[in-house]
Amino acid sequence: MKHAIATMLTVLSLTWGADAEAQAEPIEAVISAQIKAFKADDFEQAFTYASPMIKRMFGDAQSFGVMVQRGFPMVWRPANVQFLNQEERDGAVWQDVLVRDSTGASHVLQYEMIQIDNGWKINGVRVREPAGLSA
């Protein structure tokens, strides 16, 4: 009996791990693609990764691009990007991303991701300074 329970728990943990990894890959791909578009100043392409709510807020790709340049310069011109933890809260998935800007400063960005009919979209980004990290 103990062996059967241990086997079942192992299978469940492997399945959950595979599900979490399968979910992480497309989310990371969307964020990476948007950052790549920002680096190329392709705001039209970057805007395609935004959720419908974000698109309504900014109206067009140029307004969105201006907001990113002014409010999130570390995303517009990152020196390095590293994916951290991911968790599900309140019907959304939150992906933490460590970004080093061109001056070497570190920023942890919390991307709120939502899944809609045509895949994962970015529904918002919050900046949180990383604890214990220095430039």
Image: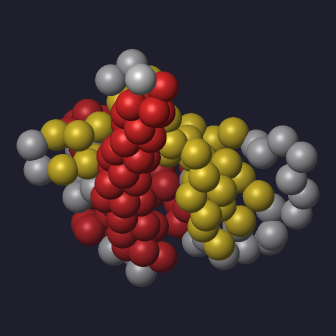
Q: Is residue 3 above or below residue 120?
A: above
Q: Which residue is painted at 48% across and 76% down in the image?
A: 39
Location of the N terminus by quadrant is: top left
Residue 31 seen in this snapshot: no
In this rendering, position of residue 68 left or right of residue 46: right
Location of the C terminus by quadrant is: bottom right
Q: Nearer the viewer, residue 86 or 107?
A: 86
Q: Nearer the viewer, residue 44 or 129?
A: 129
In this rendering, position of residue 134 left or right of residue 117: right
Which residue lies most toward the top here? Answer: 90
Q: Position of residue 109 (x, y in %)?
A: 60, 47
Q: Position of residue 124 (x, y in %)?
A: 42, 38
Q: Position of residue 22 (x, y in %)?
A: 32, 54
Quarter of the rendering containing residue 117: top left
Q: Position of residue 77 (x, y in %)?
A: 58, 71
Q: Nearer the viewer, residue 119 or 8?
A: 8
Q: Which residue is painted at 42% across and 74% down in the image?
A: 36
Which scheme is used to colour this image of the protein?
A: secondary structure
Which residue lies most toward the bottom here? Answer: 40
Quarter of the rendering containing residue 15: top left
Which residue lies most toward the left here? Answer: 117
Task: Count numbered badges in the picture.
Answer: 0
Residue 104 seen in this snapshot: yes
Q: Is residue 87 above or below residue 72?
A: above
Q: Which residue is painted at 26% across and 34% down in the image?
A: 53
Q: Which residue is painted at 65% across and 56% down in the image?
A: 98
